[in-house]
Amino acid sequence: MPDNTLVRLIDVCKRFNKGSETITIFDRLELSIPAGDFVAVMGPSGSGKTTLLNLLGGIDRADSGEIHIGGIRVDALSESALTRWRGAHVGFIFQFYNLMPMLTAAQNIELPLLTRPGKDRRRHVETALKVVELADRKKHYPREMSGGQQQRVAIARAIVSNPDLLLCDEPTGDLDRATADEILSVLRLLNRDLGKTIVMVTHDAAAARHARRTLHLDKGRFIERDLAA
Amino acid sequence: MNDLVLIRQNLRRQKLRSALMAVSILIAFAIFGVLVGFERSMNAREQAAAADRLVVVNKINFTQPLPIAHYSRVRAIEGVRQATHLSWFGGYYQEPKNTLIVTAVEPETYLEVYANDYDLRPDARAAFVRERTAALVGETMAEKWGWKAGDRIPVSSDIYVQKNGSRAWDVTIAGIVRGRTPHIGTNFMVLHYAYFDETRLFGKDTIGWIALNTVSPSVNDRLAKTIDRMFANSANETATDSEKAFNRAFGAQLGNISLVVVLIIGAAFATILMIVGNTMVMAVRERTREIGVLKTLGFSRVRILRLILGESLMLALLGGLPGLGLAALTAVSLRMSSSSLFSALVLTPDIALTAVVLMFAFGLVTGLAPALSAFRLKIVTSLGRS
């Protein structure tokens, strides 16, 4: 494994049972993502894009194979160890933001910090808010913000605990073009200036162009095209 | 921010729903506090009964009188340490609805038999024994009517009339009696039997029942049999039993209070439990996706379980504690009402403590099903649900 490899999948298999039928999503899937990369994953519906993110984030388990992230074999971790690892090393950004409606922007961003001991939570939250340029909206509730602003809060929440890996599931799927470009600019900034490794699932070719490279998933295998400008 | 803030904010998200659930719980605990307090007050006489005390009543029914001659014969039996007699007066103050628990007693012997039950100042004791029209009033009754030593008041009877046609006996309060333990009720008045017997139109030379202290509780059974045997086949046969049994029989006139209380409280709690439990299940189900997000962010399953149980516990306390407060206010209000039925109704600390324990149990029971469901929920499943 090269020194700068952050994500590595070896012979990963994943199947789902649908009634009496077994559907194979991945059959001996291999993947390697170096640290600091920004990868877009595209593919037709049902190709396993979201399943891939779930496996990388440790919120779903592979049937067989190995998943190494940051030198840790996450598929072998116990449930509680996996939860701790996820809280410390992975940031999630969802299509529909998934903010807690009863919490303010600042409180939403603070959530991942509640899972670990530590001081200066407020300072971390302030920093994350500055990165997404929402310092003036910290006391606003999700219902008081636009879709783009809510997604920025979700991004701040994903980066507040300074994770190595950001997993984005259609982060611009619910936004108009201009707002989507703003969000993608923030992601690019996180990748370029803060060195975050990003794996982004998207249907949007325009969004994928913001990534350094795009992986196409088809029938459980990757077809790689280099789109870096 | 901490878990408490999360719990509080979750309760606030549907304010009306949370308020309605809290009010339901409030009503359940208000019912609990008042009814258990009532049940305790009804059973207080039983708990306060002395182990070495027997009560001799007419075998037909304890409301039937006994000839006063029985009293002299009972006193003379070996094993009787002290004895006194009491007669039900059937009292009220000013209006029949203002019921008073009044008995006519023989002052010296009454004070001897009940010496261990009540505290009375020596000067009040002397005044009561000395003055033919004197009366002793229990602390609860005195507080209720605002009476004090030296007050002269008319006490009417709904059973007896005087020879002059009046139903009212004027008495002077010689002193206020205090119970030595919390179980001893003080909502009563005693007046002189001699004064009562001499002036009443009918029932002369009869008494209601005899109370006696034995030399030891171990002789109670033998003594009770001796007394009843003594009056067997007479015109006024007796039934002698422990004071505890007598008090229980007295309370049973109103029916099985404990059973009624248990049934009402059980029905109230079962209903509220189902309503709140069902609402909690729905409330948590609506948050399935959020629970998945929290798990994704690194919240452990145990912590999620704790958060939901914390929410149901907080809800139980938010409803239960004011409910207990309402019960205490209701108890005071009922105690101050004219009905003597509630005169000893008190929300004691042990009832309050039991209620708080019940609140925790209520919170745990109503939160357990949704908490376990959230505990088991897979992230992938929860994120897939809208």
Image (cartoon, rainbow, N blue to C red):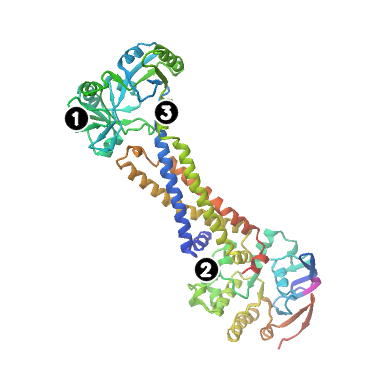
| Residue A117 higher or lower than B210, as above or below | below
Q: Which mark is residue A45?
A: none
Residue B51: tell me if it is visible: yes
Q: Residues within 10 Å of mark 2 (few under 14, many from 20)?
A: many
What secondary structure is found at the residue carrying circle 3? helix
Over which residues does the magenta segment extend?
Answer: A25-31
Give the letter of the chain under mark 3: B
Q: Residue A145 in the image: state x and y as whole percent.
A: 51, 77
Horizontal side of B285 relative to A68 (left or right) equals left
What secondary structure is found at the residue carrying circle 1? loop
Occupied quadrant, residue B69: top left
Q: Residue B100 in the image: state x and y as whole percent.
A: 29, 34
| First of labels 1, 3 by sequence position | 1
Q: Which mark is residue B249?
A: 3
Report how far apart the C-alphas of labels 1 and 2 lie in the structure. 79 Å
The amino acid type found where label 2 is placed reads: Gln
Establish whether labels 1 and 3 are both on one chain: yes
Tell which tag, 1 or 3, sits nearer the viewer: 1
| Residue A195 higher or lower than B216, as above or below | below
Tell which tag, 1 or 2, sits nearer the viewer: 1
Secondary structure mostly seen in the magenta stretch = strand
| Residue at x-position 45% and y-position 14% | B222
What secondary structure is found at the residue carrying circle 2? helix
Residue position marked by numbered label 2 in the rendering: A107
Give the letter of the chain under mark 1: B
Residue position marked by numbered label 1 in the rendering: B166
Residue A29, magenta (yes or no)? yes
Report how far apart the C-alphas of labels 2 and 3 lie in the structure. 64 Å
The amino acid type found where label 1 is placed reads: Ser
Q: Residue A195 in the image: state x and y as whole percent.
A: 66, 77
